[in-house]
Image: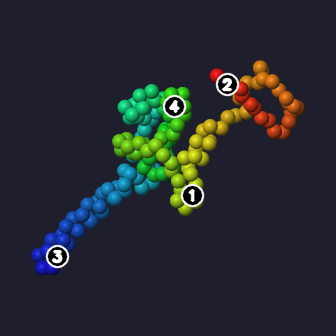
Amino acid sequence: MNRKKTVLITLIFLVVASFFLKNPSAIYAFGGCEQDCLKCHTLNEKEAEAVLKPLIPDIKVISVRMAPAKGLWEIILESKGKKGLAYVDFSKENIILGQIVKIKTRENLTRKRLIELSKVDFAKIPLERALLLGRSDAKFKIAVFDDPD
């Protein structure tokens, strides 16, 4: 390689390196948060609904919070009477309808969150018109539904 090419490549490298040194956020794939992403990025239920409406017209956003993967929002939504979970990136241009799995532990974080969301507080189930079998003070209780609609 001749000297001119070497000098040109070195110069280009220095320009690019100085850009990243002056703008450290440019090296982060999802928006450049180094600590608290909520300082730079926000998304509320109303905004999330507006972002997702073109894709899911009958969407109702229940809640929005930071996802377990950096750079994503976790959106709990309801569509056609069913609850679901979706992820939207900080740019608010991409949606991920899938699972987040922690590589080291192989833990499915999406499934874990869906189980959390679908838990029912037994104390809140109306039992006034229920058919009770067994002792009312039993340690374990089972509820069987026969046509909940």
Earlier residue among tags 4 and 1: 4
Q: Which mark is residue 78?
A: 4
| Mark 3–mark 2 CB contact (< 8 Å) | no
Earlier residue among tags 1 and 2: 1
Report how far apart the C-alphas of labels 4 and 3 lie in the structure. Answer: 58 Å
The location of residue 96, given as percent across then percent down, is: 43, 44
Q: Dot 1 surroundings within 10 Å: few (below 14), some, or many (20 or more)?
A: few
The residue drawn where x is 54% and y is 28% is 81
Q: Residue tagged by mark 3?
A: 6
Report how far apart the C-alphas of labels 1 and 2 lie in the structure. Answer: 36 Å
Q: Nearer the viewer, mark 3 or mark 2?
A: 2
Question: Which residue is at the front of the view, 2 or 144?
Answer: 144
| Mark 4–mark 3 CB contact (< 8 Å) | no
Q: Residue tagged by mark 1?
A: 106
Q: Which mark is residue 148?
A: 2
The residue drawn where x is 29% and y is 61% is 20
The location of residue 95, given as percent across then percent down, is: 41, 42
Which amino acid, by three-letter code, is at mark 2? Pro
Question: Which residue is at the front of the view, 36 or 132?
Answer: 132
Q: Which mark is residue 58?
A: none
Q: Is residue 99 above or below residue 52?
A: below
The location of residue 94, given as percent across then percent down, is: 38, 43
Which amino acid, by three-letter code, is at mark 3? Thr
Q: How many marks?
A: 4
